[in-house]
Amino acid sequence: MKQTSEVILKLPIQTEFGVFCAGYSEAGLAALDFPDAAAAYETPELSARVPKSITAWHELTGEALNSILAGQAPKRFPPFDLSAGTDFQQRVWKALQQIAFGQTRTYAEIAASINNPRAVRAVGGACGANPIPVLIPCHRVLASHNKIGGFSGGLNWKRILLECEGRRTWGALRDA
DNA sequence: CAGGATCTACTTG
DNA sequence: CAAGTAGATCCTG
């Protein structure tokens, strides 16, 4: 299920938690990386030649990202390019976007919502393969009975994001 | 074919 | 209750 839509440009996004890195393809936002010391961005010189459409998308990405980090539901998103994922993964990612800001689901609920109730474990895999964390809210997926589950970007990020969204009932959350 | 960001049921202190 | 175990299930590379 691989597509030809590759990331053609990476741009930085300044936030209070550090500098995120957004990757764009011809179709839209295709990747979002957590602040990483070794992140490679385009130089300012190259930014000058950034296509107009991408400039607009980047603006939306920045607004949406910072909005979430500030505890507010974003009003608008840039177009997502999810063509790198398999059919199953794309179905999961679509389901993730149905979770409202501040709400949470369990892996089992996501599996059920895509009519594949037994694929709970596979859903976990698809979440880990999510190319656009935060905007596609993989952090709003918890395990059953108040367990936090995992997170590919680091479990602490998951906690930070959830707190940003007002879920402070963390005393009850258990680890693995 | 092995392994994972799971789940449920069951067994022990 | 809390914690640990086993088996079931399904997508990926």
Image (cartoon, coloured by chain):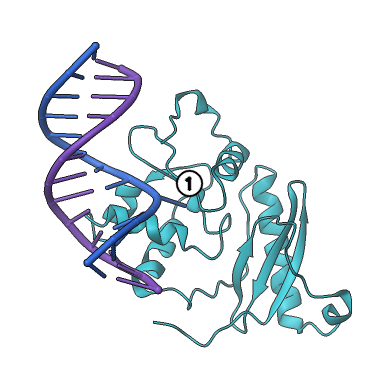
Chain colours: A cyan, B blue, C purple
> For the C terminus of chain A, which image quadrant?
top left
- Residue A77 can be seen in this image: no
**Can residue A119 be seen from the camera position used here?**
yes
In the displayed structure, A5 sits above or below A87; it is below
Circle 1 crowding by C-alpha within 10 Å: few under 14, some 14–19, many from 20:
many
Which residue is painted at 65% across and 42% down in the image? A71
Nearest the eye: A52 or A41: A41
Q: Amino acid at mark 1?
A: Arg
Pick the front one: A49 or A121: A121
* Chain identity of mark 1: A
Q: Residue at x 61, y 77 (%)?
A: A28
Among the 4 quarters of the image, the one containing residue A159 = top right
Residue sitting farthest toward the right: A45
Residue position marked by numbered label 1 in the rendering: A140
Q: Secondary structure at mark 1?
A: helix
| Rendered location of residue A91, percent (x, y) | 37, 67
Compared across the picture, whether A32 is left or right of A123 comes to right
Left or right of residue A54, residue A174 in this image: left
Q: Determine whether A108 is above or below A166 in the image.
A: below
Q: Is residue A154 above or below residue A20?
A: above
| Pick the front one: A21 or A102 | A21
Q: Quadrant of the N terminus of chain A?
A: bottom left
Is A20 on the left or on the right of A129, as rendered? right
Q: Residue at x 39, y 32 (%)?
A: A146
Residue B13 at x, y percent in the picture: 24, 11
Residue A14 placement: quadrant: bottom right
